[in-house]
Amino acid sequence: MKFAKPHIYFWITALVIFIAGLFTFSDKNALIDINVHNTYFIIHLFHLISLLSFLYFIEGCIYWILKKLKVSLIYYLTQIHLFFTIGGLFIYFLLMTIFEDDTEIEPGVFNEASILGWVIIFIICTILFSQILFLINVIIGLIKCFIRK
């Protein structure tokens, strides 16, 4: 299957993420607490999901602009970026809904929750690595386009 229109996949994913985020809009307990030294940053999950859907929309726009400018990207790098960015996100949300647990975890104990934490870190790292591949793909495509002209 050829991914001729990856921008469509990113736009659909951005829409799905935003619609899923609307369900957390009225939940007052949907907060993320980040502690940095002596400061606590409290972020509502709706704001984080809105940012994430905006980033996916921007990636779709970049693919669309490159298609309109007739910049040819490397097919396999586009496939890898699409698979890991969209697939990794859905695997992350799937794991978070399956293994959602409100029990207290004892520090220093190796259990299923710590394994889940390592899996989630691995998924986030692969998503971030695929963004680097996306930048490399865009730079190579633009260089090839400018050399042709």
Image: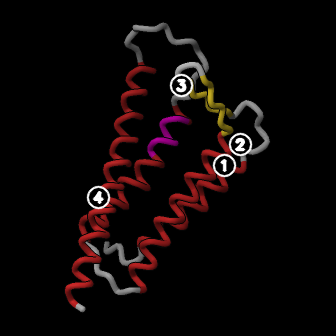
Q: Amino acid at mark 4?
A: Leu
Q: Amino acid at mark 3?
A: Val
- For label 4, the SS is helix
In this rendering, the label closer to the viewer, 3 or 1:
3
Q: Which residue is mark 3?
A: 36
Badge number at residue 29: none
Instruction: Tell me where the magenta segment starts and ends, as one range.
Output: 91-96
Q: Is residue 89 above or below residue 147?
A: above
Horizontal and vertical percent for residue 121? 39, 34
Horizontal and vertical percent for residue 61? 49, 72
In this rendering, the label closer to the viewer, 4 or 2:
4
Give yes or no for contact between labels 4 and 2 (Cβ–Cβ under 8 Å). no
Q: Which residue is mark 4?
A: 133
Q: Give the distance between the C-alpha atoms of the residues marked 4 and 1, in whole angstroms.
A: 27 Å
Give yes or no for contact between labels 4 and 3 (Cβ–Cβ under 8 Å). no
- For label 2, the SS is loop
Sequence-first disc among 4 and 2: 2
- In the image, what residue occupies the spot 65% across and 40% down? 45
Sequence-first disc among 3 and 1: 1
Sequence-first disc among 3 and 2: 2
Q: Amino acid at mark 1?
A: Gly
Sequence-first disc among 4 and 3: 3
